[in-house]
Image (cartoon, rainbow, N blue to C red):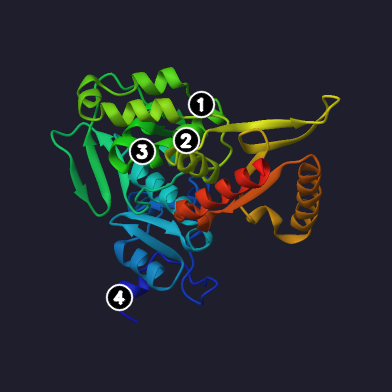
Amino acid sequence: MSTAESKSAVPAGVNGAGGPSLPSPLRVLAAGQGGVFTSGQARGFGLTRQDLARLANGGAIHRLRPGEFAVRETWQVAEPWTRLLLRTKAALLHRPDAVASHHAALAIHGLPLYGVDLEKVDLSASVKRPFRRSGVVTHVREAGVVPIDVDGLLAVPVARAVVQTALASGLVAGLVAADGALHRGLTTIAEISAAAPPAERVRGCQRIRELVRLADGLAESPGETRLRLILQILGVRVRSQMEVRRRGGRVVARVDFLVGDRVVVEFDGLVKYEGADGRRALAAEKEREDLLRALGFVVIRVVWAELDRPDLILARVRAALRSIAA
């Protein structure tokens, strides 16, 4: 054993993969930070750069970028959007002067993400010009934008993050975030409309106007947002989250979308049907759908993969409208 190895601060314990384990105090600190820590924090517990390299090679931690790490167990089970959140948390720990922006801010606010680069973290800080380094884009801090503290992490306000995301990643990305934020009451249409500075209102005015016009806080998922937008682009007039009643006025169902008077279009996320609870939900859904058909409605179900086939969705809606008119 070399002298350097003999002086290593990493304890003799092993992790689940048989390699060196993360010291307990640092593990506790990381857990309190969502599963991430910085090399500076590790040094405070006596770990050297070589110790961190051994921990990473041994499978105890995952290196996110220079000086930023995640506990391996946390990283391995994280979904792609959760990994963006971990990267963002670590970047903010490393840059305490910075504020999360764009879709990184949406992740901090717990809002849905679609159509964004999940491996890129956007921050704003007191820099002279924007730059990108190791997957983190640092933007010039915007005058007049007061950050929000979310569980100890700073992020631009929700409305500003929605507008930034729409301008940087496209209308659909911004609309998914806007719908989610409106549904949860985290912002308003007026705040979104006012969140674009004058210069952006000139460059991206059409996109922001479309975002404000199309946003709908009734949407309960990104799938519903995308489906509604597809139907609108195809020229299909839809009403969201409509209640279906019996003749006596009793509500028997609330449907995602109603086209005309009797065509129901539902987004089916499928994941809700997993396990024993899922089987019960599926049975209840079938009973609900049978009732709708008994009342004279045609029900169309659209799954996530079909959102990339708008022609198929339009053909099914048209066929349903023809069957009712016949």
Which residue in the protein does label 1 denote?
186
Q: Which is nearer the eye, 202 or 228?
A: 228
The numbered dot on residue 218 is none
User: x%, y% of residue 165?
Assistant: 34, 37
Vertical relation: 176 (above or below) 41: above
Q: CA distance from mark 2 to mark 3?
A: 19 Å
Q: CA distance from mark 4 to mark 3?
A: 58 Å
* Circle 4 crowding by C-alpha within 10 Å: few under 14, some 14–19, many from 20: few
Q: Quadrant of the C terminus?
A: top right
User: x%, y% of residue 224?
Assistant: 55, 42
Indicate the amino acid at tag 4: Thr
- Figure quadrant of residue 138: top left
Q: Quadrant of the N terminus?
A: bottom left
- Sequence-first tag of 1 and 2: 2
Which residue in the protein does label 3 denote?
171
Indicate the amino acid at tag 1: Leu
Instruction: Please state if 233 lies on the left or on the right of 186 as rendered.
Output: left
Which residue in the protein does label 4 denote?
3
Q: CA distance from mark 4 to mark 2?
A: 47 Å
Which residue in the protein does label 2 denote?
109
Q: Residue at x 64, y 56 (%)?
A: 270
Q: Are marks 4 and 2 in contact (CB under 8 Å)?
A: no
Quick one: SS at disc 3? helix
Indicate the amino acid at tag 2: His
Q: Residue at x 49, y 48 (%)?
A: 29
Q: Nearer the viewer, mark 4 or mark 2?
A: 2
Q: Residue furthest right?
A: 248
Q: Residue at x 31, y 67 (%)?
A: 50
